[in-house]
Image: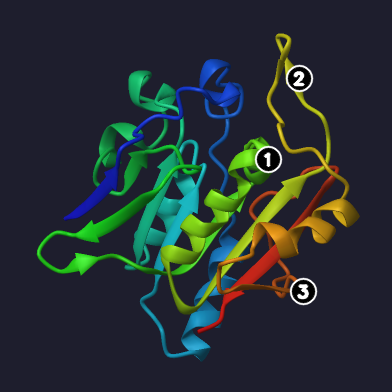
């Protein structure tokens, strides 16, 4: 049994909780990506592997990876899908899908076995939703929940998004500006930037770019 430890079970201050535009609609997955990362971890003799998706929305990516026999967890800042019994939440809430403010400290554990660490963490079209003041904590959490040698992959939108007068994308920078900021954002972690190595992505929205980080011991 997996347990989430957090003092912030909902991202109450997040515009995406106030106006749950994405979380009420999205349920992304990609079989090509899942096959590709499975092959990647097989090459490292780390199958089954442990996986976590941040801003998991409907949770389909997490469920698909879980159904292949891996340890898979999804964290979502809004409780919209819980309240509306949407997508995969009725079956998997508080089992492999949890609500949590991912810009605040959190950890996971397997009951009776201790802290759960992950071989891979992802966040698709999520990072731009994090307030600039919370980006360092967002990435520190990733660092602290990865195994040494583990990887983070995700996409970042560079576009402004305003819905019903609410600015949903709080960290809007060009790709060049993001890369100029990463040294400061990742300071104090063991995360290092690498060229995105996979052919498949879960989200590839217009105006987005993809990153990968590796935790180096």
Q: Secondary structure at mark 2?
A: strand
Question: Which colour assignment does the render follow?
Answer: rainbow
Q: Nearer the viewer, mark 1 or mark 2?
A: 1
Left or right of 122 on screen, residue 159: right
Q: Nearer the viewer, mark 3 or mark 1?
A: 1
Q: Which residue is disc 2 drawn over? A: 162
Q: Residue at x 46, y 29 (%)?
A: 11
Label 3 to label 2, Cα distance in Å? 30 Å
N-terminal-most mark, 3 or 2: 2
Q: Is residue 204 above or below residue 131?
A: below
Can residue 117 be seen in the rendering of this structure? Answer: yes
Q: Residues within 10 Å of mark 2 (few under 14, many from 20)?
A: few
Label 1 to label 2, Cα distance in Å? 17 Å
Tell me where residue 60 appears, x and y as whole percent.
46, 46
Left or right of 95 on screen, residue 152: right
Tag 1 and tag 2, C-beta contact below 8 Å:
no
Q: Nearer the viewer, residue 21 or 131?
A: 131
Q: Residue furthest left?
A: 112
Quadrant of image for the N terminus: bottom left
Q: Secondary structure at mark 1?
A: helix
Residue 6 badge: none
Q: Quadrant of residue 10?
A: top left
Q: Which residue is disc 1 drawn over? A: 132
Q: Which residue is disc 3 drawn over? A: 195
Tell me where residue 211 appears, x and y as whole percent.
72, 63
N-terminal-most mark, 3 or 1: 1
Tell me where residue 78 appears, x and y as whole percent.
45, 28
Q: Residues within 10 Å of mark 3 (few under 14, many from 20)?
A: few
Left or right of 154 on screen, residue 189: left
Q: Residues within 10 Å of mark 1 (few under 14, many from 20)?
A: some
């Amino acid at each position: 049994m997996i347990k989430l430890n957090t003092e912030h079970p909902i991202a109450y201050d997040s515009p995406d909780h106030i106006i749950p535009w994405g979380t009420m609609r999205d349920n992304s997955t990609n079989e090509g990506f899942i096959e590709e990362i499975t092959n990647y971890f097989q090459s490292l003799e780390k199958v089954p592997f442990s996986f976590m998706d941040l801003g998991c929305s409907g949770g389909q990516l997490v469920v698909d990876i879980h159904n292949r026999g891996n340890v898979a967890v999804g964290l979502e800042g809004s409780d919209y899908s819980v309240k509306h019994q949407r997508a995969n939440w009725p079956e998997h809430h508080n089992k492999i899908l949890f609500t949590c403010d991912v810009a605040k400290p959190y950890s996971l554990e397997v009951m009776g076995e201790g802290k759960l660490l992950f071989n891979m963490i992802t966040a698709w079209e999520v990072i731009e939703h994090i307030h600039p003041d919370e980006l360092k904590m967002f990435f520190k959490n990733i660092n602290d929940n990865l195994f040494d040698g583990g990887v983070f992959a995700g996409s970042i939108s560079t576009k402004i998004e305003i819905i019903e007068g609410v600015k949903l994308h709080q960290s809007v920078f060009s790709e060049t500006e993001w890369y100029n900021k990463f040294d400061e954002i990742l300071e104090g972690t063991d995360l290092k930037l690498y060229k995105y190595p996979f052919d498949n992505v879960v989200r590839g929205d217009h105006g987005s770019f993809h990153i990968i980080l590796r935790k180096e011991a």
